[in-house]
Amino acid sequence: MGMFNKAIRCFDKCIKIDPNNETAWINKFIVLSELGKYEEAIKCARKALVILMDKGDALSELGEYKEAIKCYDNALIIEPKDTYLHYSKGRCLRKLGKNEEAIKCYDDAFKIDPYNLDILYMKGFDFEEMGKYEEAIKCFDKVLKMDPNEMNALNFKGSSLIKLGKHEEAIKYFDKVLKIDPNDVMALSNIGLIFSKLGKYDNVREIFPKVIEAHLDLDNAIRILKILYLNQNYSKYELEKISKLNKKMLDESIRFLKIFKLITETQEGEPQPRTEINLTPEGRKIVESLIEIALKDWKI
């Protein structure tokens, strides 16, 4: 008994010096449990759990995923049925490219909380990264079973179907999204992408203006598109200078055009690489049919 009490005093000194010393809290919890002081022990365990969770989250934000996983693992020893811990560990494993292990964590989390949509989404993303699109679709289908109008699940299922080459079926899911929100950029962009893959440029011509109208920087996006059409192989710096845009506006416009697969970026030159921005072959065909409309409708 005396040795236990002496140990507790030592742990208390450690905690006084560093209140966030999870090891001291855990050891104090173990000793108090041995002494049968369960209420005090539980308080120590809860304190250690909070510290480990916060530390794991902070390390994860910093990209220290291996260290974060250690914190979550230690926390799971204290509370093995915590959904958040399993889910967070899975996200870290995914960042490390350990998709199979991540999926196991999501499965453990889902057993505890079978109505958590975030878990299903993350599991679906992992399957997509592994190229297992059918398995990803099963995850998104489970979300849709809970909520048939969940737009993210409709969009992600459509994206997986595109990767399987099931274009017509994918369009049905994007159409469902557009019935809920006619300006959803992801659905519009993917429908446009499908039409461009199929060579249906007349259909793309209908979709593309809708995508641009839903975008905050439509004037700049079209201006850049026009410059790229007339003059190939511009660097970002040259494009910014010609179109009189600031860097933030330029980056946003380029991001939008990349989503629609109209441009590509390549790094060239040493020691300071120059980013060149080019129309894709598909992009050029689309722009050829759009440039007249753009000049007329948006007065560029």
Image (cartoon, rainbow, N blue to C red):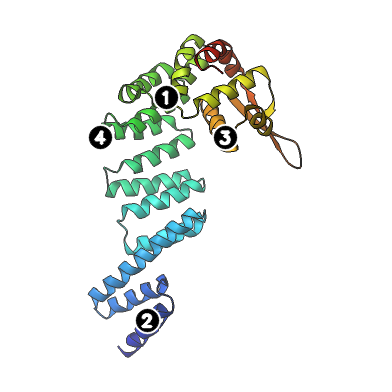
Q: Residue shown at 35%/40% (left/top)? A: 120
Label 3 or label 4, whichever lies nearer to me, is: 3
The secondary structure type at the circle numbered 4 is helix
- Residue 37, by quadrant, is bottom left
The secondary structure type at the circle numbered 3 is helix
Give the mark, 2 or 1, whose residue is nearer the N terminus. 2
Callout 2 amino acid: Asp
Question: Mark 4 packing: few (<14 Cα in 10 Å), some, or many (20+)?
Answer: few
The secondary structure type at the circle numbered 1 is helix
- Mark number for residue 251? 3
Callout 4 amino acid: Met
Question: Mark 3 packing: few (<14 Cα in 10 Å), some, or many (20+)?
Answer: some
Give the mark, 3 or 2, whose residue is nearer the N terminus. 2
Disc 1 from disc 3: Cα separation: 29 Å
Circle 4 is placed at which residue position? 146
Disc 3 from disc 2: Cα separation: 54 Å
- Residue 107, by quadrant, is top left
Give the mark, 3 or 4, whose residue is nearer the N terminus. 4
Q: For the N terminus, which image quadrant?
A: bottom left
- Residue 147, by quadrant, is top left
Label 1 or label 3, whichever lies nearer to me, is: 3
The secondary structure type at the circle numbered 2 is helix
Circle 1 is placed at which residue position? 161
Circle 2 is placed at which residue position? 12
Disc 1 from disc 4: Cα separation: 20 Å
Image spot of residue 124 (x, y percent): 40, 37
Q: For the C terminus, which image quadrant?
A: top right
Disc 4 from disc 2: Cα separation: 49 Å
Q: Residue shown at 57%/30% (left/top)? A: 254
